[in-house]
Image (tube, rainbow, N blue to C red):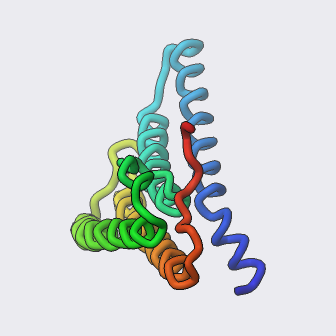
Amino acid sequence: MSSTLKSLDKNLERWALLIFYVMLVGTMFIEVARREVFSYSSIWGEEIVRYSFIYLAWIGAAAAVKERGHIRIDVIMEYVNPRIKALLYMFGDIVMALVAIVALYWSYEAVHVSWTFGSVTHGLRISQVWFLSAVPLGFALIMVRLIQSFIRDINDFRTGRPVYEGDKLFD
C-alpha cells in the first residue's frame, strides 16, 4: 500500500470530521453574532449547520467502527478466551455489515428519488442530493471499515494474537 493510501486510510475520517466541525462551529458563531448584533439571521446558516452535523454523525460512525469505539456491551468479553473473543467480534462485524448493507440500499433509494425529482434545499437552493448523500456515503465508509476490521480479526485469529479491542474510554 502506498504511503498516500496509508495516510488516507489513517486520517480520512479525522480530516473530514475536522472540516465539518469547523464549518459547523464557524457558521453557528457567525449566525449567533448576526442574530445578536444585527438582529438578523439567515436561513442558509441554519441549513449549513444542520447538514454539517449530519455529515459529522455519519463520518463519526465510520470512525467509531474503525477504532472499535462504538457502543457495545463487553462485560462478557472479560470472561472468554481470546479465540472466542475474536469469533464474537467477527460475528458482530458480520451483523453490522448486514445492517449496513440494508441501510445503504434504502438510503441510496432516498438519494435516487431526490435526484430524479430535482429536490432542492429551502435556504441554499441547491440539490438535496448533496446532503442526502451523507447517509449512503457514511454507510459505505462503515462497510469499508467493517471489511478492514474483519480482515484484521481473521489475521489475529489465525496467528493467535489478541483481537484488537480499541481504546477503552474508562478503565
| Point 55% across, 78% down: residue | 160
Residue 161 versus residue 28 in the image, above or below: below
Where's residue 57, x and y in %? 44, 49
> Residue 38 appears in which quarter of the rendering?
top right
- Any part of residue 137 in sight: no
> Residue 87 appears in which quarter of the rendering?
bottom left
> Residue 166 appears in which quarter of the rendering?
bottom right
| Point 50% across, 57% down: residue | 68
- Any part of residue 97 in sight: yes
| Point 34% across, 66% down: residue | 92
Looking at the picture, tell me which residue is in the foreground, 85 or 115: 85
Q: Left of 91 or right of it: where is 20?
A: right
Q: Left of 40 or right of it: where is 120?
A: left
| On-image quarter of the N terminus | bottom right
Where's residue 116, x and y in %? 24, 72
Looking at the picture, tell me which residue is in the foreground, 11 or 36: 11
**How many numbered markers are drawn?**
0
Where's residue 125, x and y in %? 39, 51
| Point 74% across, 78% down: residue | 4
Looking at the picture, tell me which residue is in the foreground, 84 or 13: 84
Where's residue 130, x and y in %? 42, 61
| On-image quarter of the C terminus | top right
Looking at the picture, tell me which residue is in the foreground, 117 or 108: 108
